[in-house]
Image: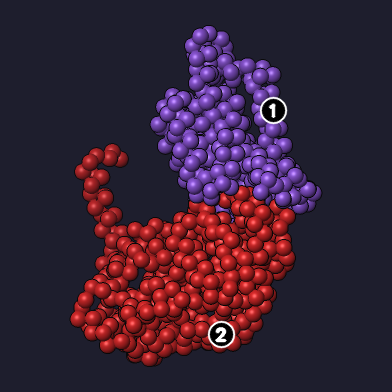
Amino acid sequence: MKINRRRFLKTAALTGTAAAFPYFYTQKFAKAEESDEIKVGILHSLSGTIAIIERSLHNAELMAIEEINAAGGVMGGKKLVPVVEDPQSVVRVFRQKAKKLLLQDKVVAVLGCYTSASRQSVLPEFENNNGILLYPTLYEAQECSYNCFYTGAVPNQQLDDFAPWVIDKFGPRHYLIGANYIYPKETNREWKALLDNFGGETVAEEYAPLGHTEFATNINKIASLQPDVVFSTLVGDQIVAFYKQFKQFGITAEDIPICTPITTEQEIKGMGPEYALGHYTSFNYFQSVDSPENADFVSRYKATYGEDEVTNAVMEAAYFQTYFLAQALDKTGSTDADALITEGLPGQEFQAPQGKVKIDEKNHHTYLWARIGQAREDGQFDIVWKSEDWIRPDPWVDLLYPDRDCDFTDPRVIERIKSGDRDRSGTIEI
Amino acid sequence: MGDAVLTQFFSGFSLVAILIIAALGLAVIFGVAGVINMAHGEFIMVGAYVASVVQSGLGGNTFWSIPICFVAVGLLGLVVERTVIRGLYDRPLETLLATWGVSLILIVVIKMIFGTELHYVGSPEMLQGGFPAPGNLPFPWYRLFLILLSILLLIATFVLFFRTKFGLAVRAVRRNRSMSEAMGINTARVDMLIFAYGSGLAGVAGAVLAPIKTVSPTMGFPYAVDSFMVLVLGGVGNLMGVPVGAAIIGEGETILAFLFNSVIGKLLVFLLIVLVIRIVPRGIFGYQERTLGHRR
């Protein structure tokens, strides 16, 4: 068969229509299905550089949706239907996909994002289209949007108890090392304020460019300064390289412990447990948390995604935020965004693997538990300290921002958002 | 303070060694075949994955994975040369794009096989720990091993180039390709073998760097950048450029990082490189090589 231009165009047009048919079809019949299905967007990178961690969030959310559906769904028998998009670890694509989920799929809410950069890029879409984003990552806070619910830890939940504990146990002289971008810098700002408060001292503060994995120099400085503690906010590949080289230069956790709010079971798996042995991490959740909910969660996750998998704090948040959404839908009995934002989600409680968690009634962040874990031989953590109660999230940390707060029940904020103002943040000066 | 400086000097050596090991394969391929191999970092990455398979699958340590990675990644290089590079010699821009494509493919393939999570490669039992060195930190055995290995690889490459018949052919091809062809040297075969040898060296780099760094699909890129820096500074076309370039960058970076911090250290080294290529555009050794070539 000879292919000329006309034949090519004809075939192309035909295949094009055929390929697009399912789309037209679902568009036309979407209304009919609405009655017993509720669409939920899942927006995590399944390819690209941060897919390593984001795939686990994606998995945890799908698992939660399956469980919710198996238990009878929401709003009296309706099923949650995940609409999965892959933003490919590219910030720009995050925004495009978010827009698509909101305008084309008309999802009731989106569970998604991991990095602060991706969250900040999609937020305008959620604010302009009055959508709902549930965001599971620990982050540097100093933000609260009407259209976003934050289920990961903010600095006060990870650092406030950690700093006095570390100073008390190991001593006041801290060496700060971090990756050279916003999260480590903000975290160190808070840490230094805490050190000031509890009689600690910063002996040095250093940053390594992202992607930099040669730490001999820093380790040498650590050896000559002899701090009591190394406080690390290195991320990703850097964590593995730093812990490995730390031990290879002969410094053990007994000499100088590394304390960090970042290193999870995932990184320890990547470096080999002998390198993390004895060092400390502060988190809300560890795989080794001893609760029936966690035992269930871990065994179900392993059964679904493989025995080698480890669970981590961010995916635990991804898991329970899906339940928050389901319970909020049950409570309001509607998919109306404003109803969910003002009545459905605030105050919602759930018995999560880490313990009972709750969305704060005022600031869209989540009450979480604080724990300090010490890495052991099998790559898991021994939990050496646990908070006596859940800890209230404070997106504007009192130590650094004493006269600022986030409150969506404040009349000024309600008024501003009702008036259709472009500023949809709940931040107020007090 | 004096102790710290001494330790710093020693750890600088180990960085120099890492740079030599990472850059040597790239230098060999670029110097002889004239191909800028953008996939060099990914060849190192594949080497690291082969090492992780050797460790977890076959139970062998780094000493085992060095020859295995050399052969495995060398063969990979051979295949790439035969299928992709072969038709593109003397078209530098196209080889640049083609090898970049190869690098993307390698990343995706590795992700499909091994997933995206970090992989663990340990160092051999007998190289764990360190020995008391002058300065304030024990010096890790493994870093001493890297220094020795870098010297060994340099010697091996020099011997191959200057003491074997194949090396004679390689040098002839590098000086004057068409004349070599006229003399009966099979230049296509020289290109192919050199590409395989250079790739094999990248594989060795992956095998020995895995225990001190991270094994992930995207680990190759920083090594590729560092290797290019070494080449640009040291000059291409002369093997001596590799150790000299590596020494300046490695020691420079560690000393500056100690005096200031890592961010400023890197910045100043980049600045130094810009300055050097402003004065001697072909790199420290590339320039001399060129003038000698003209005089003869």
* Residue appearing at x 52%, y 13% in the figure: B293
Residue that label 1 marks: B155
**Which residue is the site of mark 2?**
A355
Q: Picture coordinates of residue A110 (x, y %)? A: 37, 73
Kind of residue sitting beneath label 2: Gly
Residue A331 visible (yes or no):
yes
Residue drawn 26% across the image and 50% down it: A12
Q: Position of residue B215 (x, y in %)?
A: 60, 52
Residue A331 image offset from top left, x and y in percent = 38, 91
Q: Is disc 1 in the same subunit as disc 2?
A: no
Query: Which chain letter goes with mark 1?
Result: B
Q: Nearer the viewer, residue A9 or B57?
A: B57
Describe residue B246's horizontal placement relative to residue B58 as left or right. left
Where residue B286 appears, as percent x and y from the top left, is: 51, 23
Rendered position, B11 above or below A313: above
The subunit letter for the residue under badge 2 reads: A
Secondary element at image label 1: helix
All told, the count of numbered labels is: 2
Q: Please state which of residues A166 and A331 is positioned toward the viewer in this rendering.
A: A166
Kind of residue at badge 1? Ile
Q: CA distance from mark 1 to mark 2?
A: 61 Å
Q: Is residue B41 visible?
A: no
